[in-house]
Image: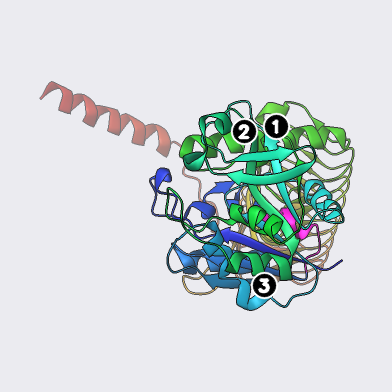
Amino acid sequence: MQVSLVILAAGQGTRMNSDLPKVLHRIAAAPLLHHAMAAGRALEPARTVVVVGHGGEEVAKAALGYDERAEVVVQAEQLGTGHAVAQAAPLLADAPGEVIVLYGDTPFIRPETLQAMLAARAEAGVVVLGFHAADPGRYGRLITEGDALLAIREYKDASDEEREINLCNSGVICASAEVLFRLVEKLGNQNAAGEYYLTDVVELARAEGLSAGVVICDEAETLGVNTRAQLAEAEREFQINARAAALEDGVTLTAPETVFFALDTVIGRDAIIGPNVIFGPGVTIESGAEIKGFCHLEGCHVSRGADVGPFARLRPGAELAEDVHVGNFVEIKNAILDEGVKVGHLTYIGDADIGEHSNIGAGTVTCNYDGVMKHRTVIGKRAFIGSDTMLVAPVTVGDGALTGSGSVITEDVPAGALALARARQVTRPGLATRLMDKLRAIKAAKQKA
């Protein structure tokens, strides 16, 4: 079955009190929009159309950053959800198969729920996603008779009796492209808000003799984000669910409530994650690896048997092979560390390739930036880099080579060679005592004056 997605992302989100479009506020290190796109991606959609409005260029960039095949249309005026869906009609009206309408500010719809909606389409012309609300508030109400959906009534237009209903509308709708856009074209705006409601397609469908049905999900899936408080609550809910999923998948979290995941974090079975670890976007931790406490990781890959931290930072492009050790207060960026490399502590490795079983001493820095361009450092296999070595890139250290502690390496070091690049030590017996006595005398004279 071919599926297309329409994701509504045109709202300004005035209650967020922000210059940033609402759908670009982040949960789990990813824009709200990406969460909606991720749920839909599980259906392997043939086409994805994102409807943008406020901050359209920024939203479009974010959409294409997640899925370069996404198509973007502009809703110049925000005249309601039905009007927003109509903007996608020129692209999808003739598309075969189903269309599901999602919302860029509703991040928790599960792929399984969308699959259930597609299955329900076998028995109904239009399928709506509903939920039983603990506090229905100002949600639209689903008017049903048995299993049939008769209408969706927006709160502003509902009677007192209809407002007593607690089966509420999520806004998510599924129908064939041909039916959906034909019905959307018939929408009017004769309602309390003067808007074109997508919800009116239910009554329009029934007027054509089509049936409408409801798939019911947990209320938590329908959580929308309209305020900063709701954004914080959504972050909390995401992390609770992500931690539970990791534990269920065989990951050890020694202090689950202190670990924060990103939307796309991948962690293998039997990995160990210590307390206060933060995952940014694009992290994969393989089975059996260990990330110790107080580490921050983003855009990196950690292989089986490697251990990281505590207090380490892995930045984008960090690739750690099997059994690599990265210790405390080490930062790795855009660097490949081959099997068995050890970087114990207090070190910066950026734009580098380090061969297997090499040892990087404390305080080592790959000096990769000349103020204009980045340059690469290459260290061979089983090399030993002495503590406090400055490797001024571009530079190569060969297999089995050694650098003396405190060296500033500006030239290539051949395989097996020892490189020393520091000033000769000068020792003056007794000078430290005489100098300190003189300084103390000067200080005492100043205090008497």
Instruction: Inspect the image, locate mark 3, and give the three-letter code of the amino acid beneath it.
Output: Glu
Would residue 362 be visible to someone looking at this image?
no
Secondary element under disc 3, as helix, strand or loop, is loop
Gap in angstroms between the C-alphas marked 2 and 1: 6 Å
Q: What is the spatial separation of the Cα atoms under label 3 and label 2, in whole angstroms?
A: 29 Å
Amino acid beneath label 1? Ile
Eyeballing the image, is 399 above or below 384? below
Q: Few, some or many C-alpha atoms within 10 Å of disc 1 (few <14, some 14-19, many ≥20)?
A: some
Q: Nearer the viewer, residue 19 or 271?
A: 19
Q: Give the residue at mark 3.
A: 68
Of callouts 3 and 2, which one flags the residue occurring earlier in the amino acid sequence?
Answer: 3
Q: Percent position (x, y) of residue 329?
A: 62, 42
Residue 151 higher or lower than 52, as above or below: above
Residue furthest to the left in view is 449
- How many angstroms separate mark 3 from mark 1 (CA)? 30 Å
Residue 66: x %, y % from top left:
66, 64
The residue pinned by badge 1 equals: 240
Within 10 Å of disc 2 (Cα), the crowding (few <14, some 14-19, many 20+) is: some
Residue 186 numbered tag? none
Query: Which SS class for mark 2?
Result: helix
* Contact check, label 2 and label 1, Cβ < 8 Å: yes
Query: Which residue position is annotated with label 2?
Result: 236
The stretch drawn in magenta includes residue 38:
yes
Tell me where the magenta segment starts and ends, as one range: 36-45
Prevailing SS of the magenta stretch: helix
Residue furthest top as drawn: 448
The answer to whether 327 is drawn above or below residue 276 in the figure is below
The chosen color scheme is rainbow
Query: 372 or 63: nearer the eye?
Result: 63
The foreground one among 446 and 309 is 309
